[in-house]
């Protein structure tokens, strides 16, 4: 009803204006903040904006800098800047980056309990480099030693 009443049924025409106005318009809808507005603008083919999945801004920040921020907004802006700098400003490239980040954040680089040992990019990840624990040799693993002593 809002689209019909406030925008004459043509929200796309309103969103085709200046980017700042388009984002402001989208954020007037319930439940839409910067990540949602950016995603809509990107996937609707309105602007090849550097959208970041709302559940994954920490992924790029960890990968590049080793530690994500406590402040969600700071992590979001930093991840968005990284995409804007490194990913070509085309719809296909930015959509692909968005989907890859979303998938990686959901499957591997979870906010809590990341699965760094399963990560295909861990060799280039600042977070992994800063937080990895040296792997113990199987011969020195406490369970192995305990089992060896029991067998004697």
Image (spheres, grey):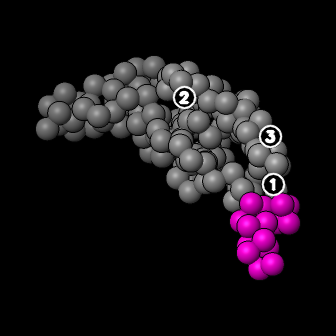
Residue at numbered disc 3? 129
Q: Secondary structure at mark 3?
A: helix
Looking at the image, is mark 3 or mark 1 earlier in the sequence? 3
- Give the residue drawn at x 82%, y 66%: 138
Q: Is residue 45 left or right of residue 28?
A: right
Tell me residue 149's x, y (percent): 78, 71
- Per the model, the C-alpha gap separating discs 2 and 1 is 32 Å
Q: Residue at x 76, y 44 (%)?
A: 132
Residue placed furthest toward the front: 152
Q: Is residue 138 magenta?
A: yes
* Residue situated in front as seen by the camera: 8 or 139: 139
Q: Which SS class for mark 2?
A: helix
Q: Nearer the viewer, mark 3 or mark 2?
A: 3
- Comparing 61 with 118, the one in front is 118
Residue 76 is labelled as 2
Q: What secondary structure is the magenta-colored segment mainly?
A: helix
In the rendered view, tell whether residue 136 sits above or below residue 46. Answer: below
The answer to which of 10 and 47 lies nearer the viewer is: 47
Alpha-carbon span between mark 3 and mark 1: 13 Å
Q: Which of the two discs, 3 and 2, labels the residue nearer the N terminus?
A: 2
Quadrant location, the C terminus: bottom right
């Amino acid at each position: 009803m809002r689209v019909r009443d406030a925008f004459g049924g043509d929200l796309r025409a309103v969103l085709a204006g200046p980017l700042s106005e388009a984002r402001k318009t989208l954020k007037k809808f319930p439940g839409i903040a910067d990540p949602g507005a950016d995603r809509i603008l990107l996937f609707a083919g309105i602007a090849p904006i550097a959208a970041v999945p709302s559940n994954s801004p920490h992924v790029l920040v960890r990968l590049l800098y080793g530690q994500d921020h406590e402040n969600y907004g700071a992590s979001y802006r930093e991840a968005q800047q990284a995409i804007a700098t490194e990913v070509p400003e085309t719809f296909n490239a930015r959509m692909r980056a968005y989907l890859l980040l979303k998938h990686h954040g959901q499957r591997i680089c979870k906010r809590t309990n990341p699965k760094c040992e399963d990560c295909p990019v861990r060799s280039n990840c600042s977070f992994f480099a800063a937080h990895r624990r040296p792997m113990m040799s199987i011969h020195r693993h406490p369970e192995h030693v305990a089992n060896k002593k029991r067998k004697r």
